[in-house]
Image: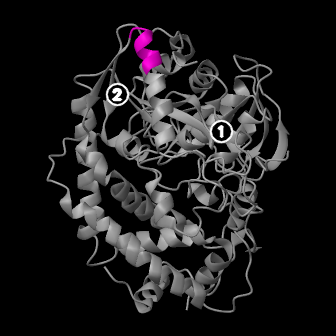
Amino acid sequence: MSHNAFITEATVDPTDSGPLDGVTVAVKDNISTEGVRTTCGSAMLEEYVPPYDATVVRRLKEAGATVVGKANMDEFGMGTTTETSAFGATENPAAEGRVPGGSSGGSAAAVAAGEADVALGSDTGGSVRCPAAFCGVVGIKPTYGLVSRYGLVAYANSLEQIGPLAPTVEDAAELLDVVAGPDPKDATTRDEGADSDYAAAADRDVDGLTVGVPTELVEGADEGVVEVFEDALDDLRAQGATTEEVSLPSVETAVQAYYVIAMSEASSNLARFDGVRYGPATDSEGNWNEAFAAVREEGFGEEVKRRILLGTYALSAGYHDKYYKQAQDARAWVKQDFDSAFEDVDVLASPTMPVPPFERGESLEDPLQMYLADANTVPVNLANLPAISVPAGETDEGPVGLQFVGPAFDEETIIRAGSALE
Amino acid sequence: MTVDDEEVRHVASLARVDLDDEEVERFTEQFGDILEYFEALEEVPEVDREAELANVMRPDEVEEGLTQEEALQNAPETEDGYFKGPKVS
């Protein structure tokens, strides 16, 4: 296991037989597995062993899958490189010396290196699609509400979804079929996906499909990435799809809105890590507040502290209207922009990441630089839409992913479009 | 937007996170840049939000939950079947 794709290797046997018989799955380490420690890549949860399975894990086991390990990740999902894990960085098997992307980097690396057939990750602002793009595999961020979040350790609830990673679009779609559908344990789940057959949609038939290309998501991208992207569009046109430019002016403020909302939700969600019900013991002799602060200093890494503090700041008296309220306005604007684009086109296409995989260590010193890399993926989470990243080719610096975004609960169309590039 | 180290220490105390001096210095520098970047949100136009929201309720029925032992199994300290925490004041 040379790429450090797993935090914990384990064998969890299936409980039943089904469509995933004989399939091995890597599960991101923020998804609870009964009896197998679930760390979220954090020293805070180094010893935490959940007493129950996440709904998606139960569904995997019932479908015949064997879980082979808990995949490495940026601490609590906060990162774009899988370098902030308390258990060491993961290496990109498809571009050695470079990062696998994040925060589900271990899940993508396990699939790219053949250490698992398929994997589950979670996507709050691109955390499934980014590592899929950097590692040359397929990743799907489902529509918000399609997949249960019961048992997913919360970072930013209003944005995140569990999603599949796999070597092919059909494999990813099949895994999505297994985990999608309503769950009485998560009241945000919806009925769409209950009897899904997304795998059947991977039929490569894009004849007559209208693909919108948002200029704002291509303009800022690296030259080599744009070349690969344009070649992929040529390929789609050759198969009968038409492409047209569209404009999404709201995406210019999507990264800011995303980070304000995600950090605000994180500051609230991570308040549960007080060292009482779980977490490391400290020898603080202080009162409750002092002991609480001491355990969080010890248990959290720098990026997690940065986001908790910025989120606390954004929600604090005097700043709530300036940051949080405006970010919610920006979110509504993004949603409106996507809705009007889908009146004219079936799907939207862009490079998944505007840059090729970073060299290791490159982005750690400058958090703002890392946040900017999420420009193409975060609008999708703000609008609660589905998106897929499929391998589109390579630059000298590593793989390039192409992202298709679809209307809410129209996973079939993005899966169909993605399969046409294979 | 400028942020001074006192503000960083104040927010850290609100968030119940101890910081060492080096972290305070680094965060003070970074927060200025990041918050300045967030200022772009001032340019966002007013948008009508038309979210259709519905409460989702299920019958309030007793279901099987974790046992007391399971609920306590990850706690660093317990006593007589309870979590044991630091004193409140």
**Closer-to-camera residue (A138/B77):** A138
- The quarter in which the N terminus of chain A is drawn is top right
Instruction: Write the start and end of the magenta stretch as one range.
Output: A234-240
Mark 1 vs 2: CB contact within 8 A? no
- The residue shown at (73%, 81%) is A282
- A361 in relation to A312, above or below: above
* Residue bearing the label numbered 1: A135
- The residue shown at (42%, 76%) is B31
Which label lies toward us, 1 or 2? Answer: 1
Element type where label 2 sits in the image: loop
Quadrant of the rendered image containing residue B23 = bottom right
Magenta stretch mostly in which secondary structure? helix
Q: Residues within 10 Å of mark 2 (few under 14, many from 20)?
A: many
Residue A100 position, x and y percent, is 66, 47
Sequence-wise, which precedes: disc 1 or disc 2? 1
Residue A123 position, x and y percent, is 52, 44
Marker disc for residue A293: none
- The quarter in which the C terminus of chain A is drawn is top right
Q: Is residue B64 left or right of residue B28?
A: right
Say if residue B20 shows up in the picture. Answer: no
Say if residue A59 shows up in the picture. Answer: yes
- B74 in relation to A241, above or below: below
Marker disc for residue A407: 2
**Closer-to-camera residue (A184/B58):** A184
- Residues at discs 1 and 2 both on one chain: yes
Q: Is residue A361 left or right of residue B6?
A: right
Name the residue type under label 1.
Answer: Cys
Element type where label 1 sits in the image: helix
Name the residue type under label 2.
Answer: Pro
CA distance for labels 1 and 2: 26 Å
Residue A24 position, x and y percent, is 78, 29
